[in-house]
Image (spheres, rainbow, N blue to C red):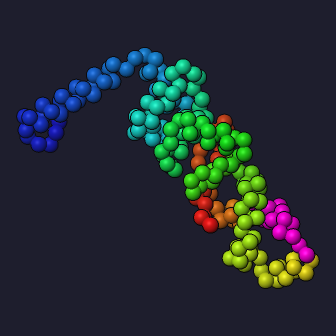
Amino acid sequence: MIKHNSEILNKLFFRELQDLVEKYNKIDEDTKIKIEEIISNLRDEELKTYLTNNPNKLLEIIEETKEIELDKSVVTFFAWYNSEIKEIDLEKAKEYLEELKINNYLEVQDYIIYREEKYLKEYAKELLEDRLEQEYYVDKLFSKEQVIEMWIEGTTKEEMVQEIVDNDSLEEVLELYPQYAFTMNGIEYRYSQIEEE
């Protein structure tokens, strides 16, 4: 019942309520099964809540998977990315997920999503190649004594990058502040916002 004592408002309220009941009663058995399958396959309660609070995203999954087998990994990634980063469609989620599986990390927007720190080596190498050209980062990564020692020994930039990648905490060097993202196939993924150059 609504708070205001108004016959017209009560009629409008009950009409909308009736329309809503009719809408859900019209859902066919296949769609009902698909909805239940999607929600019950998600392990993360926050992702379940996101999809139940965003029926348009749930509907997108249903529409895209009518003729094909439901991929739990894609649904997990799609729901997480939409809830935490930015809205994307299911096709883009599939594309991002494929890249994440191939490289074990994904740099997208102002974020990096990755499995474990050890999988950031290639990303770190690329980033450090550029950063070691900038005084700010050289000063941040090395003491003056280290820089002098490397200069005397004739250490190349490539050797410096390799030493950092092999010996230092990459999350710290890359200034990442990782947060739990999601678990897929028993593997935990993290994400962090990345600093713009």
The C terminus lies in quadrant: bottom right
Residue placed most toward the observer, 15 or 105? 105
Instruction: Mark yes or no: residue 43 visible.
Output: no
Q: Is residue 159 rendered magenta in the image? A: yes
Q: Image quadrant of residue 71?
A: top right
195 horizontally vs 102: left or right: left
The secondary structure making up most of the magenta span is helix
Instruction: Mark yes or no: residue 92 visible.
Output: yes
**Relative to 129, is 68 above or below?**
above
The span picked out in magenta is 154-170
Residue placed most toward the observer, 148 or 116? 148
Which residue shows up at 59% across the image and 55% down it?
A: 111
Image coordinates for residue 173, horizontal then vertical, percent? 71, 66
Which residue shows up at 24% across the image and 26% down it?
A: 19
Image coordinates for residue 52, horizontal then vertical, percent? 42, 36
Which residue shows up at 48% across the image and 45% down it?
A: 87
Image coordinates for residue 88, horizontal then vertical, percent? 50, 42
